[in-house]
Image: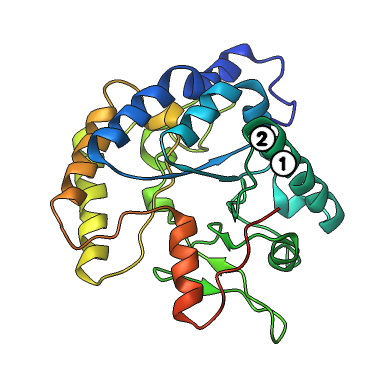
Amino acid sequence: MLDGALRHNPRYFTEGAYGPFRALPRLLDLLARHEMPATFFIPTWVVEQWTESCAAILRAGHEVAYHGHHHEFFRDLTPERQLEVMQRSREVFRSRLGVVPSGFRTPSGDWTAQTPSLLREFGIRYSSSMRGEDRPYFHPAPEGAVPLVELAGRWDMDDYTSLAYFEDPAFPTGHDRISDYRAVLANWCAEFEGYHAEGLFWTTILHPKVSAKPARLAILDGLFSTIRKHDDVWLTTLDQIARWSLQQAGYPAGQEPS
């Protein structure tokens, strides 16, 4: 959505700007109250425009990770162009925030056949881009190489599917209303409880501009409270889960990206 197509659509553009400008501080406060670490996947164009907001994420003890530069659709990019985006993003993270991330979530929810190898060779420890598992797994890698860890998300835990509505352009396609907040909270809590009952890996796909608006914070507060009722849940960043997954399989967790 940051590819320039919406440059002359200020109504839509300011909807996105609401995230780092107004919604993010509320979300950081809520995470702090529940003592919950989080991973933020950030397009580096956003880092350039709202550097201080992104720095606040790190100061609060959270992780930042790759999410393209202009929120590019990786499935439409050649491997060479994908590498260019990753290199540009790394430089922005390094120069603006003083960090080099270890994780990646593709902005489009998919990629090309070459992307996993490209990410591994680039020094990425994990991806959270695919949708088809509820346990960490490894992408194929050459013998002797440390594989790329996949920590899959789920569309049913993406706030866009129930809380996002944009008129022009119409997105998500086919939406004509926003779901009842009580139903959203009940659904998300049920999803968590189901995963917890089987001891599975579980993550969310949340956007501050969508789910960190004032009334919607009650949904997140209810979800976080439900999670916190359990004393046997490991709440941590995705990087920590990726490191654990590699160590459990006998791989070194790898050096810090540089």
Q: Amino acid at mark 1?
A: Ser
Give the left or right position of residue 115, taking residue 223 as reference.
right
Can residue 180 be seen here?
no
Residue 184 location in percent, x, y?
26, 40
Give the left or right position of residue 27, taking residue 47 as reference.
left
**SS at badge 1:** helix
Q: Nearer the viewer, residue 139 or 5?
A: 139
Q: Residue furthest right?
A: 80
Q: Whole-Å distance between the Cαs marked 2 and 1?
A: 6 Å
Can residue 68 be seen here?
yes
- Among numbered discs 2 and 1, the one appearing first in the sequence: 2
Q: Residue at x 37, y 52 (%)?
A: 156
Q: Residue at x 44, y 35 (%)?
A: 175
Q: Amino acid at mark 2?
A: Thr
Give the left or right position of residue 14, taking residue 59 as reference.
right
Q: Residue at x 37, y 49 (%)?
A: 157
Against 132, is 145 above or below? Answer: below
Q: Quadrant of the N terminus?
A: top right
Residue 118, numbered label: none
Against 177, is 66 above or below? Answer: below
Q: Residue furthest left?
A: 229
Residue 167 location in percent, x, y?
51, 22
How many numbered dots are placed on residues in this image? 2
**SS at badge 2:** helix
Give the left or right position of residue 228, taking residue 6 as reference.
left
Q: Disc 2 vs disc 1: Cβ atoms closer than 8 Å?
A: yes
Q: Residue furthest bottom?
A: 143
Residue 89, numbered label: 1
Residue 44, numbered label: 2
